[in-house]
Amino acid sequence: MQDSEYLTMPRRKVGVVGHTGYSGAELVRVLRRHPHVEPVLIDLRSPEHRSGPALTRFSWSPEALAEHKLSLLFLATPPELSIELAPVALGHGMKVVDLSGAFRLQTVENYRRWYGAEHTRPDLLAEAAYGLPEFCRNQISHARLVANPGCYPTAANLALKPLLEAGIIDRTSGVVCDAKSGVSGAGKKPTAKTHFCEVAQNFSAYSVLDHRHVPEVLLTSGLLESEFSFTAQLLPVYRGILETIYFRANRPLDAASIEAIYRERYAREPFVQLFSNGAMPSLHSVAHTNLCALGVKADPATRRVVVVSTLDNLVKGAAGQAVQNMNLLLGLKETEGLE
Amino acid sequence: MQDSEYLTMPRRKVGVVGHTGYSGAELVRVLRRHPHVEPVLIDLRSPEHRSGPALTRFSWSPEALAEHKLSLLFLATPPELSIELAPVALGHGMKVVDLSGAFRLQTVENYRRWYGAEHTRPDLLAEAAYGLPEFCRNQISHARLVANPGCYPTAANLALKPLLEAGIIDRTSGVVCDAKSGVSGAGKKPTAKTHFCEVAQNFSAYSVLDHRHVPEVLLTSGLLESEFSFTAQLLPVYRGILETIYFRANRPLDAASIEAIYRERYAREPFVQLFSNGAMPSLHSVAHTNLCALGVKADPATRRVVVVSTLDNLVKGAAGQAVQNMNLLLGLKETEGLE
Amino acid sequence: MQDSEYLTMPRRKVGVVGHTGYSGAELVRVLRRHPHVEPVLIDLRSPEHRSGPALTRFSWSPEALAEHKLSLLFLATPPELSIELAPVALGHGMKVVDLSGAFRLQTVENYRRWYGAEHTRPDLLAEAAYGLPEFCRNQISHARLVANPGCYPTAANLALKPLLEAGIIDRTSGVVCDAKSGVSGAGKKPTAKTHFCEVAQNFSAYSVLDHRHVPEVLLTSGLLESEFSFTAQLLPVYRGILETIYFRANRPLDAASIEAIYRERYAREPFVQLFSNGAMPSLHSVAHTNLCALGVKADPATRRVVVVSTLDNLVKGAAGQAVQNMNLLLGLKETEGLE
Amino acid sequence: MQDSEYLTMPRRKVGVVGHTGYSGAELVRVLRRHPHVEPVLIDLRSPEHRSGPALTRFSWSPEALAEHKLSLLFLATPPELSIELAPVALGHGMKVVDLSGAFRLQTVENYRRWYGAEHTRPDLLAEAAYGLPEFCRNQISHARLVANPGCYPTAANLALKPLLEAGIIDRTSGVVCDAKSGVSGAGKKPTAKTHFCEVAQNFSAYSVLDHRHVPEVLLTSGLLESEFSFTAQLLPVYRGILETIYFRANRPLDAASIEAIYRERYAREPFVQLFSNGAMPSLHSVAHTNLCALGVKADPATRRVVVVSTLDNLVKGAAGQAVQNMNLLLGLKETEGLE
């Protein structure tokens, strides 16, 4: 396609199911600024109030789906619902990006253990591409169905995988990932745990060692469960994830050497940002962007290394990465609508 | 002393230098509720506004110090100032509880490395008792000068020391302590880092691997620097510290077995609270109390263990522990004024 | 009673229904520090988890109520429940302090209009004393049933009533009360409005002009509805109420003259604190105390006056004032347990 | 200009002095998304760290200013500095948008009273257009120098002016404007008042009745000082202003009638949004947008009216409105870069 054709091609319609949740709403915001697609809102039930942005909107039915000629469908729905809806959309020839955990874990055994339910579409579970473009770009481009990664695994894998590939981590000593997330990661449904009075001026750990995002890290990074300790914790902020990752290097390495590994691996990656010289990114560094930012500190004498990895859980951890995947699936520029 | 004598003994005067800072002000609050002492405010310079609680107050001078017949002096001052003031008070026969890092590190070498200055009173540095009553009660009771521990080390040592004594930690794999603190820990002086707009909705790491509280953990716990990775991080809350501590057990242990170690060690300790059955304490669990709360999660199969240790940095991490030490120094009930 | 008798009299048992809500839990905290009463927890249903403080606890029944020989019952329950429970307790000879709006509005007409329901005990509605000690101390002391005031009306009436009594407010120009409350005022039940993500970094008005606390201000202050504009607003804080009150003086008055009115009226009131010389109290001024703090600004030339009134909605606005009322009902020192 | 010319015209360079402050940094963010201008950073001193966005950057000097051929200069500087810099830029033929209060008050008398200093350029003070496009569009379009309005006056004037023009406000009873602002409005300089620990979980009034933004409201709305009571208050949020405005209507009016006045007046205004049927906007309604949102509640029987007006203090209250003014000054579409 020539540049002029690219610029003038008609907007393609993409549907969003689950657009009232935090990730879904963020997705609609990102898509509205995208020059080459037109977001269409799809309701699973008749909504009580049709408030919200002035966009094409219809209620879910296979007929309506066919009629609206969508190129792609985003599912920002719970996993059990995604398993129901994805096949319908695929059956109508659409591409699907699913933001839930429904299709991330490759096998029914994994799904049973971590999601506590039988997976009814093992074929799609096996077929789905894992939507981490920095490591699975080729599979994504050729896929029909993309499992958009979890927020925690995105931050962890972008930090760990280059170092594991470079072979510098002493895996026998274990890797620790101490993860903190803003409250939007817990979803929009009001619960005792998301009540302002419980969260404000507080900080608490949950799902220590057994968070369902752990297997995503293991599957992508190749770490064994015995080598990886993960704790999720709730921060009194709206958005953002920060992971502090600890390991021992298997040889004396200073921070600059480790930064060099990242710099080489991510030289052409538009959405990974490296902080240098001991500077550490914070939540503010990446809020409202599709960036994952990394910072490194290392003590060569004792081989101790600390990596900080941070991203906006609603953008690179959900909606932004979903649009990045959409761009790949639809043959658009990968950064379109994300800068 | 008989009960009736104890109840009716006259209040003893205790001085507070540095009463306008966060720790110092908390100290005054705690002391005002204490039935057996009377806090006296001491100003280093003439204050611009003599606002604040209606208490006896005077400006620092050796003469004034002598005249007011204080039993004990609290120094909530920077370390370089504490080194100057402590000898004066000791010279007048008072006991001293110093809340700074001036007298915590035992040797001039330690002090030089971590505080970047020469210590001018190595004799007092060697003499000072480390004020962690759960482990140094006897020394404290017989001391003239107590170095009140740092907030981070208090949480870390209370979590680690019983397990190290029980010999269950695989030290060769290393211990990780991922620490988070509220902003009052950074002091009252306005800086770019404590500006509301920089802190709110943010989370950031600082002093990664080289925080000056690290040597306090090493000296008390016996861990080697190569075995201990520590990161301090700033939480958008006023008060509270939570540390997530990771290690590998050197044999398969479930959480109940580890809890049993704590339960036995802390059976008679009024200010250590153990959460059971996988429950994890949060900042709210300990806010405004002198408690340090502990929770444990363990996976016997892989020997991974996570301990959460949390306390209020202004109370058990500073003013409350200082009063606990005062009670020991003055022969009062250790819990007086702290429940 | 002589002093020595007072000090040694046995603790009297007082029951708390609704002790898991924010006001009820605060009430239990206050009562536990009170030297002359022993709080007893009463559950309306069998609780799932009997966590919480180690106190006598039983399930509600008229028999259990009789058996435990309570001197007084606190109801921290919704109004419709208070209307049911209060008569039972009164029938057993207990005093009752009700924290709901059930008995505040004097007439069934008022109750119908503002609470949208028929009041089934108009006799008790007429009998109840309004529990604002600074203005109704005598009635409270002789009452069986006290209607503990709402948080907003307490702040408004303490600010307005002395000035209305002094006749300095130009009522024809109207009085504006712009009120802001922390989230604990909205109760513990998780709702879309109390979700952290909706409250944090936000500020919003609700119940503009028609908040059900308005009639409490009118009944106590004597202002007409046409003379009083009230807006309630949700602050992203846990606790605290601040009201900014505007009116025109009916003669040129400076702030000092208005402060003098307050100073005279509240000279012997332990729980009203006056800020002077243009200083204005903030939420921090009164947090965790039973104080209501007042500050005044006035422009004699234009007769414009602004009064800031602030209190802790859970203490002087609920639990603390309830204990103040209890002290009056039981013949204890009014400030007992509240300083 | 034809559409095709408009789309392809070269980007015009616009300078930003004061780009490290909150308003200045927001301005750079907005300008970078603008399709027809290129922001250029100008430093008043050599910066210590040249961090920040990759943009053309130079140090202030009349020569450098001339050399870079800027079309327009934004001054996000303190007023005394703006008074120095604006004439230099105007002398080089540039347009100037000043975000300070230097040129807002028309007369040296006003400036002396509210800013406590002599104005050295009364000619420019008289010449400057007041940059509230909804009411001064024509003057702005023909101006050389635009005084960008204060954040508080923008919200107040957009709420009040249509109603004053419609003559429905009973001015003799007075208008109350209770204003609340996020902390970014207090500037980036760390002070005791902007320390996280002083702001979080707090709320406080400042500049009661004598805020320097008051005269901007009076000059634009035509209200007399005796008719207008204004209190500024600090909210524990990063960004946003919400004003609750109270007045009495001079005839019985319901909310719908008042909304109709707004609807007609603002029918073609892209940046004023009206909430209907008693719905009230909150800070979240307008965060990160150039909108001012209005909501109305009225009681015809008593003629009491409450209007809520809210905007993002950094966008419509500063940087966004400055770009709106720039668009008018440079003949660009007024909404360019702001949607």
Image (spheres, coloured by chain):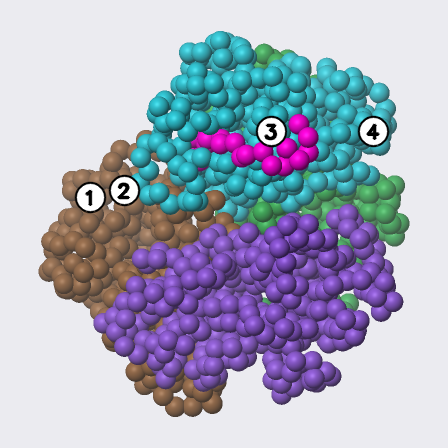
Chain colours: A cyan, B green, C brown, D purple
Q: Which secondary structure, mark 4?
A: helix
Q: Nearer the viewer, residue C250 or A39?
A: A39
Q: Give the spatial CA distance, label 1 vs label 3.
A: 68 Å
Q: Give neighbour class at mark 1: few <14, some 14-19, many 20+ (Cα, 10 Å).
A: some
Residue plotted at (45% across, 79% down)? D228
Chain name for mark 1 = C
Which residue is under mark 3?
A: A327
Q: Please check the rendered image and state whether residue A31 is part of the magenta-colored stretch, yes or no.
A: no
**Relative vertical location of residue A149 with respect to residue B79 in this rendering, above or below:** above
Q: Which residue is mark 1?
A: C65
Residue at image coords 84%, 32%: A256
Q: Residue flagged by tag 4: what amino acid is it?
A: Ala
Q: Residue at x 53, y 10 (%)?
A: A126
Q: Amino acid at mark 1?
A: Leu
Depth order, front residue of A100/D125: D125
Residue at image coords 77%, 25%: A265
Instruction: Select label 2 or label 1 by which is in front.
Output: 2
First in residue order: circle 3 vs circle 4: 4
Whether tag 2 and tag 1 are in contact, CB under 8 A, the answer is yes
Amino acid at dot 2: Ile
Q: Secondary structure at mark 3?
A: helix
* Extent of the magenta region: A1-19
Q: Cα distance, mark 2 to mark 3? A: 60 Å
Cα gap from disc 1 to disc 4, whole angstroms: 73 Å
Frontmost residue, C136 versus A129: A129
Mark identifier at residue D72: none
**Amino acid carrying mark 3 in the image:** Asn
Q: What residue is pinned by disc 4?
A: A260
* C-alpha gap between disc 4 and disc 2: 64 Å
Assess whether mark 3 and mark 2 are in contact (beta carbons under 8 angstroms): no
Q: Which residue is mark 2?
A: C42
Q: Position of residue D312 (x, y in %)?
A: 54, 58
